[in-house]
Amino acid sequence: MKGNKRIWLLFMAAAMLLIVSACSKKDKVEAEQPEQNDIEEEIIEETIEEPDEDVEGALLYQSPFTGELQEEKQWRRPILATINNHPLARPQSGLSEADMIIEFLAEGNVTRYLALFQSELPEQVGPIRSARDYFIYLAKGMDAFYIAHGYSPDAQKLLTSRYVDHVNGMQYDGTLFKRSKERRAPHNSYISGDHIVEAMDKMSGHDSIEKMPSLAFHDSVESAKIGDSASEIVVRFSSNQDFISTFTYQPNEGTYARSVKGTVTIDKENGQQVDVSNILVMEAPHRTIDSVGRQAVDLEEGGKALLFHAGIVKELEWKNIDGFLTPVENGVPVELVSGKTWIHVIPTSQGIGKAVTYTP
């Protein structure tokens, strides 16, 4: 009996050990489980983020020629149009929507504009005037679709050889180009935005931007205010009052209003004042090549430059960087203020000192 009782006691002790061990393991699992749940919740919280306005703002695209932010990226190929600047051609159409306007001597003391359109395309552009070889070289460097009506002998050779994608009113007068009844030739040739698109489709290898300019931009107007004050700027191509530009700084807008002989420059199509954020004056070697006064202009050498923006002036240089006329300081592109830019290319023989005056 004693033997059986001892066996029974050993059996009960073993059973108790099993029960205690099982409870201990269950308690351990239950104790560890909350910690695992906490880790999982932390991971979930890290992967779910609320929408951020700053993140949405980062999706805006910067226009390559103006630096302005746009909700949709504009892939349009740059368009470079030769705009008539004879007094009888004013006011011109499309200037308020040009990203850049480059003013050159064309013949004698008469200037012409190269209006560059990329971020916007006007309903009407003009009056369109004839090509010069240095206009075409610039269009080629920018990989821009070039628009003109007529050409100098040197320009005709380049266009005939298809040196640059282009459309010319000499071949499309009355079709893609229309004559205004309000003005007399050669101050009345216009091309619409729709016809520009049609011309690019027919005569261009591509209609999307493939080459970006070497331009840099400030984050704000305030960050650009380093330099001497310059609230009014006068740029002279000659003593002829018809080709002397005055720019007046508008501090509330951070832009400059342009006028000639006291008349503010406006866009004929929409009546808008043509305001710009940057004014560049660049010296380039000029040479008269014929009795009409046509010019040869060197756009490769670079030279002295003045930059006006944010109500200040900076003495710089300019370089042709991969086809783009670019303001530089110690060889590095200088930041512009976001917005439109007006460039004057003046003869080195005249010089900035004679061509430009400004007041604080």
Image (tube, rainbow, N blue to C red):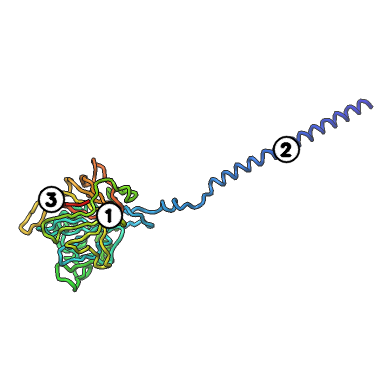
Residue 35, horizontal then vertical, whole percent: 64, 40
Reading the chain from its start, which is encountered first: label 3 or label 1? Answer: 1
Please identify the residue farthest to the left as the structure is shown. 291
Nearer to us in this view, 122 or 19: 122
Q: Toward which corner of the image does residue 157 lie, by quadrant?
A: bottom left
Reading the chain from its start, which is encountered first: label 1 or label 2? Answer: 2
Which residue is at a point 72% across and 36% down the rendered structure image? 25
Query: Secondary structure beneath disc 2?
Result: helix
Please identify the residue farthest to the top as the structure is shown. 2
Q: Which residue is mark 2?
A: 27
Reading the chain from its start, which is encountered first: label 3 or label 2? Answer: 2
Nearer to us in this view, 125 or 280: 280
Please identify the residue farthest to the bottom as the structure is shown. 181
Nearer to us in this view, 189 or 62: 62
Which corner quadrant holds the N terminus?
Answer: top right
- Res. 360 in view: yes
Amino acid at pointer 2: Asp
* Circle on res. 354: 3
Q: State the separation of the CA atoms marked 1 and 2.
A: 74 Å
Q: State the separation of the CA atoms marked 3 and 2.
A: 94 Å
- Res. 157 in view: no
Q: Which residue is mark 1?
A: 277
Q: Residues within 10 Å of mark 1 (few under 14, many from 20)?
A: many
Q: State the separation of the CA atoms marked 3 and 1.
A: 23 Å
Please identify the residue farthest to the right as the structure is shown. 1
Amino acid at pointer 3: Lys
